[in-house]
Image: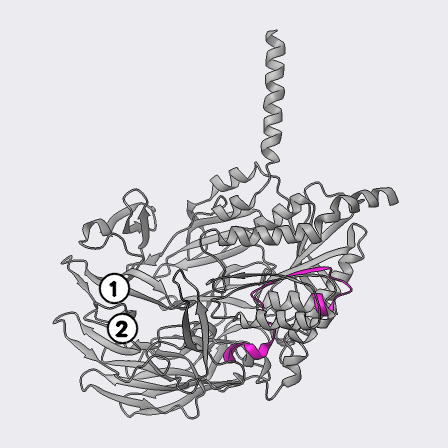
Amino acid sequence: MKRTFIFSFLLLGLASALTAQNQKITLEEIWGGAFRTEGMDALHSMNNGQQYSVLNFDRNSRTTSIDKYDYKTLEKVETILSSGELDGIQYFQSYEFSEDESKLILATEVESVYRRSTLGVFYVYDIESKKLTKISDHKIQEPTFSPDASKVAYVLDNNIYIKNLEDNGLAQVTSDGEKNKIINGVTDWVYEEEFSFVRAFDWNKSGTHLAYIRFDESEVPEFSMDVYGQSLYPTQQVFKYPKAGEKNSEVSLHVYELASKETSNVDLGNAYYIPRIQWTSDKNKLSAQVMNRHQNDLKLYFYDVKNKESKVILEETDEAYIDITDNLTFLNDNSFIWTSEKDGYNHIYLYSKEGELVNQITQGDWEVTNYYGFDQKTSRIFYQSVENGSINRDIYSIGLNGKGKVRLSSGNGTNDAVFSTDFTYYINTFSNARTPYKYTLNRAKNGKEIKEIVTNEELRSALTNYELSEKEFSTIRVNGNDLNMWTIRPKDFDASKQYPVLMYQYSGPGSQQVANRWNSSNDYWYQMLAQKGYIVVCIDGRGTGFKGADFKKVTYQELGKYEVEDQIAAAKQLASLPYVDEERIGIWGWSFGGFMSSNCILKGNDVFSMAIAVAPVTSWRFYDTVYTERYMRTPQENASGYDDNSPINYASNLKGDYLLIHGTADDNVHVQNTMRMAEALIQANKQFDWAIYPDKNHGIYGGKTRLQLYTKMTNFIDQHLGDKIEESLELKEIKN
């Protein structure tokens, strides 16, 4: 009896272990945060280069603190500030040090405006005196310390103000700001979205001058969105949104001198766009990057505040377009580091202060993907690149002369770095398809790992209980190119059976979805679909990034042509595989990916039987100037490029099952795209499914929205791709 009991107990334990290893992923777990990774929030390297600070949140007391840690030991040195010590502030959402680290700006009551812009109530905290000062009684934007921390500049109601922290005086720099008309010091909608910045003012090194961009959007057409809310009557949000071919804001650059309170206008020729301003190492010289409307002519200006003269220092042109970056770095002598694709790949260059090329620092048939900075004392540059394959990222250092390159990272996957101020240390973030995010402390000199900080080992251990498939990386030869591809197959994949296939892609210019990094929420969804019996595939076609300028820019003036051709051709190759059910191939995508999936089921209606399009552009005529014209020029110049590749014009081609999804408060890709697509399908007498999410923006989230959305998409896939999974598997076995 005893031995029988033990044997039964062992069998029970074995069965439990096997069951645990075969646990299925659920949508509730994915969108309930069960697979969330740990990270490091709001890390700031202290000026001494030996310590860093992070923002911590105590869930029990619901207070926030800024804690200082030692790089070498990773031990906490001190708590710089806890919200529990402050009267009237329970917690703050972010912090910013002054240049000398004597003061902090604390953000509270933060609310989003658009993707990057926010409004908030901000305070200045003096670390030594422990004095707390509210900057304004109003919600303001982009408060920024002067270099000596004696003042704060900010924007309120489209005007710039400077608060003197020593005597509480307030200077108003501009007075013509007006909603939907004039903006000073922060960007308009399209600059924020497409040039990726909000603060459009900058202090010079001595704090004597403030440069700012002024936007006159008076002539920009307005767009309105209904906001349904909870009230009896909906309201409307009205804002300036320049659609392709329409008028943009007229922009101008100005410099305000604090002592005289005078403002000077900066002559930038016929500047159409001013996507970046930045003071140089010389306190009297301001740099400005200026572009034409086609965004294929970039000029770097230097403006001297003494003689009020401006000069073009550097000019680059391209047959297609030039991307704007934040990589411009001025050395002590005002020579500067610059990145460019001018040799066909994105690389780092050094120019003299007169704009003469000194040397090309990096070179090769690979791309620099991130520029971390320049160490003045060792004359070394730190950067990230795809030298180890376009799906991987590694960290390197190299001399200013282009010699002595050192690979600092060692893990095969995606490495990213945050360097200490003096470039003695860096915190490396590493992941790959098998390894969740791992944070380590490393030496910047040689990349040697000193200590692990965060490993996410708990998550990795928990995932061993689930039935997970490997994400397989490969390439597929399509239209003369070897395209990067990943595949997730069912765990019990059997090549003698047939499976439905779901393809995912984004395909936007310069983007990448096939990357050797840890799971996103969507990856867990794909694992869940694989558990149901689907093969999930992703292919980065022509137009995507990190394989050279020619590969990326081949889609110029033809967005949606070559990208769609590649997805259709790839799907045909997949359909020819003996284990793929050629009648059950679906495709889905979001935003540009929704544009792609819509085009694929319409232009590839003999290949794709199902498509899901979330927040899709359905005609490039509906999208904004900066993004669309960068790749397409204007509709007036390139009507066929717009119309020949917009799904709205091919509604009559629909044969398969199509699900159209959009949020009504999408300020980016307007719901107009979906409404016009729906009308085109209706008039073509085509049946389709759709889902509209009230008051949800481009991300379609909030509360249980994502859970409901992914449940809907899963059900749609099951209904139209998965309804014959068992039948397909059995049929293949019978044929064999």
Residue ID at (70%, 73%) = 650
Above or below residue 549? Residue 504 is: above
Marks 1 and 2, the one that precedes in the sequence: 1
Amino acid carrying label 1: it is Phe
Residue denoted by label 1 = 122
Q: Quadrant of the C terminus?
A: top right
Q: Is residue 626 magenta?
A: yes
Disc 1 to disc 2: CB gap under 8 Å: yes
Above or below residue 64? Residue 100 is: below
Q: CA distance from mark 1 to mark 2?
A: 10 Å
Q: Quadrant of the N terminus?
A: top right
Could you classify mark 1 by the number of other residues whose Cα lies within 10 Å: few (under 14), some (14-19), or many (20 or more)?
A: many
Task: Determine whether, in the image, residue 325 is placed left or right of residue 200.
Answer: right
Q: Position of residue 263 (x, y in %)?
A: 26, 88
- Element carrying mark 1: strand
Q: Which mark is residue 154?
A: 2
Inspect this view and state whether residue 367 appears.
yes
Above or below residue 272? Residue 329 is: above
Q: Position of residue 28 (x, y in %)?
A: 52, 44
Task: Determine whether, in the image, residue 431 is placed left or right of residue 683.
Answer: left
- The single residue placed furthest to the right in the displayed view is 735
- The single residue placed furthest to the top in the displayed view is 1
Nearer-the-camera pick, 559 or 457: 559
Inspect this view and state whether residue 544 appears.
no
- Element carrying mark 2: strand
Q: Which mark is residue 574?
A: none
Amino acid carrying label 2: it is Tyr
Q: Which residues are magenta?
A: 601-627
Q: Quadrant of residue 731?
A: top right
Q: Position of residue 282 (x, y in %)?
A: 30, 80
Residue ID at (43%, 89%) = 271
